[in-house]
Image: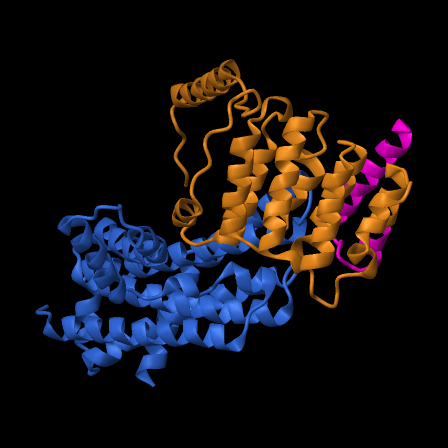
Chain colours: A orange, B blue
């Protein structure tokens, strides 16, 4: 038969639990937003810290980066972080997706350019896998930065450096998109439609995110 | 067959000791974590869930096996159960290998369960290869834990030695990569440290190439898996031989 614990112990346990909850509430929820992004670690250090679990470490680090406030983020440090995470897991799409679709789409032209150049730099390391993000970077350069030469440079890079047979024709002919008098919504629709049709985007969260961006674009016009 | 009987008794002890419940708790935590991650990821959700869940399951499988082997072995030594078993007309080799076979079977069952869960996210062939590799990795950890539990006097020291060996083996390639980039003016101390790291690496199993999450996320080749599995088999034999040498020399 189980022995009964003394009553005062129950009270002590209840009181200490209440004190723990109260203390926790007083300290508030820890949020990195508002804090400064620390300098990026080296990919080798991240690999060591994760005991070789590179895909998991890279993706979890992306979630960590996502929590920082975009308005105050130091883009030089951010690019260094994204570079390290891509070095850690070169086949992971998350760093370039957020670079092109989130961090480059801010209203600050100077910081946006940092991200676009980062996307271009990383595209050159693996063009056949990373062209979709440079294609988006070309559209951003044209429609957000109104920098036609930059947009044409990115579009020409896709044509020049991609060699895989699964790169669609519209991506290779991206320069036509850029030169043509097409508005951002039309161009984005064609690109998203093409990516969905080619089976390059299958992640439900990514599809929902991109559709939401299209709707926002439609409402702005 | 005495080895099979001993192995079965080890499995029975693991079941009665609550190992299945611990494995179920690990799965519950892992699946809860995966569900949480699906709510915060912008893209690559399935790969994120798969990578994190696989890393967690691998680490937990290794820790559960290490704790189970050291706990069961040291309890038997302290309760004088080992002396009783050795009074039976069985060789020490049979005793040792029977126990090791039982713990390896525990690792294989754990790996099969964890691998089955990953099939929800991963393609079947990479998941099965990952499961086979995890089963062997578990057997390697069981062999190391059995060796340390037989040679070291306490539970804490045996678990610490096993986990230390495992983590060092996992981290060694990153340590070597760091050591391979010396300072511009490297002294003899730096040179010695670099070569000492390389020498230690030769004594450790190449766990960095085994049970890789990349296999699940990006696929793998038979040659890659064979290289990992072959290395682990050699190391299991080495640990079993070292354990047998120690066990035969032991005065009870």
Rendered view: B7 above or below B216: below
In front of the other: A72 or B227: A72
Q: Position of residue B26 (x, y in %)?
A: 50, 51
Of residues A210 and B148, the one drawn nearer to the viewer in this rendering: A210
Q: Residue at x 72, y 42 (%)?
A: A137
Q: Is residue B211 above or below residue A40?
A: below
Q: Nearer the viewer, residue A135 or B196?
A: A135
Asked if residue A164 lies left or right of residue A91, the reply is right
Can residue B74 be seen by looking at this rendering?
A: yes
Quarter of the image for the C terminus of chain B: give it: bottom left
Expressed as whole percent of the image width and height from the top left, the position of residue A69 reads: 61, 25
Q: Residue at x 32, y 66 (%)?
A: B205
In the image, residue B61 lies in the stretch drawn in magenta? no
Which of these two is toward me, A76 or A32?
Answer: A76
Would residue B29 be seen by someone viewing this image from the given angle? Answer: no
In the image, B249: left or right of A31?
Answer: left
Q: Residue furthest front?
A: A149
Image-quadrant location for residue A72: top right
Please identify the quarter of the rendering in which residue A101 is found. top right
Whether residue A129 sits left or right of residue A44 in the image: it is: right
Q: Residue furthest left?
A: B251
How far from the left and from the top, in percent, is residue A123?
Answer: 63, 51
Q: Quarter holding the N terminus of chain B? A: bottom left
Please say if B12 is above or below A175. Answer: below
Q: Identify the main secondary structure in magenta.
A: helix
Percent across and percent down for residue A158 are 72, 54
Residue at the image point whose x is 27% and y is 62% from the top: B201
Query: Magenta span covers which residues?
Result: A193-221
Residue at 40% of width from left, 48% of height from top?
A44
Residue furthest to the bottom:
B1
> For the image shown, how many numbered marks are present on the structure?
0
């Amino acid at each position: 038969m189980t022995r009964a614990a003394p009553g005062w112990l129950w009270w002590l346990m209840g009181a200490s639990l209440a004190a723990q909850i109260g203390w926790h509430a007083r300290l508030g929820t820890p949020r990195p937003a508002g804090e400064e992004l620390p300098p990026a670690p080296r990919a080798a250090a991240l690999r060591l810290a994760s005991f070789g679990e590179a895909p998991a470490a890279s993706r979890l680090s992306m979630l960590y980066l996502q929590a920082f406030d975009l308005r105050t983020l130091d883009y030089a440090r951010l690019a260094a972080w994204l570079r390290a995470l891509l070095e850690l897991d070169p086949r992971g799409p998350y760093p370039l997706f957020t670079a092109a679709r989130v961090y480059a789409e801010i209203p600050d032209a100077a910081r946006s350019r940092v991200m676009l150049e980062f996307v271009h730099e990383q595209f050159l390391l693996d063009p056949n896998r990373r062209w979709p993000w440079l294609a988006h970077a070309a559209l951003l350069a044209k429609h957000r930065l109104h920098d036609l030469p930059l947009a044409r440079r990115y579009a020409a890079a896709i044509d020049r450096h991609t060699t895989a047979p699964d790169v669609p024709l519209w991506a290779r002919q991206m320069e036509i998109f850029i030169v043509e008098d097409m508005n951002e919504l039309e161009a984005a629709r064609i690109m998203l439609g093409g990516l969905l049709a080619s089976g390059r985007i299958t992640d439900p969260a990514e599809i929902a995110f991109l559709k939401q961006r299209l709707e926002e674009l439609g409402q702005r016009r | 067959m005495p080895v099979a009987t001993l192995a079965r008794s080890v499995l029975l002890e693991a079941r009665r000791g609550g190992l299945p419940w611990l494995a179920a708790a690990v799965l519950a935590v892992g699946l809860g974590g995966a569900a949480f991650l699906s709510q915060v990821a912008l893209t690559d959700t399935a790969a994120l869930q798969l990578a994190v869940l696989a890393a967690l399951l691998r680490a937990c499988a290794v820790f559960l096996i290490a704790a189970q082997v050291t706990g069961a072995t040291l309890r038997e030594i302290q309760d004088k159960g080992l002396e009783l078993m050795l009074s039976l007309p069985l060789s020490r080799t049979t005793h040792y290998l029977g126990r090791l076979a039982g713990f390896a079977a525990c690792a294989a069952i754990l790996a099969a369960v964890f691998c089955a869960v990953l099939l929800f996210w991963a393609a079947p062939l990479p998941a099965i290869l990952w499961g086979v590799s995890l089963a062997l990795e578990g057997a390697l950890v069981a062999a190391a834990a059995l060796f340390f539990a037989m040679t070291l006097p306490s539970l804490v020291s045996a678990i610490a030695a096993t986990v230390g060996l495992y983590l060092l083996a996992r981290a060694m390639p990153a340590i070597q990569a760091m050591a391979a980039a010396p300072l511009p003016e490297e002294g003899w101390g730096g040179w010695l440290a670099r070569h000492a790291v390389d020498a230690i690496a030769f004594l450790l199993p190449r766990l960095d190439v085994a049970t890789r999450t990349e296999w699940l996320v990006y696929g793998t080749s038979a040659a890659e898996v064979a290289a990992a599995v072959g290395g682990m088999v050699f190391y299991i034999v080495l640990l079993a031989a070292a354990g047998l040498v120690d066990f035969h020399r032991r005065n009870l």
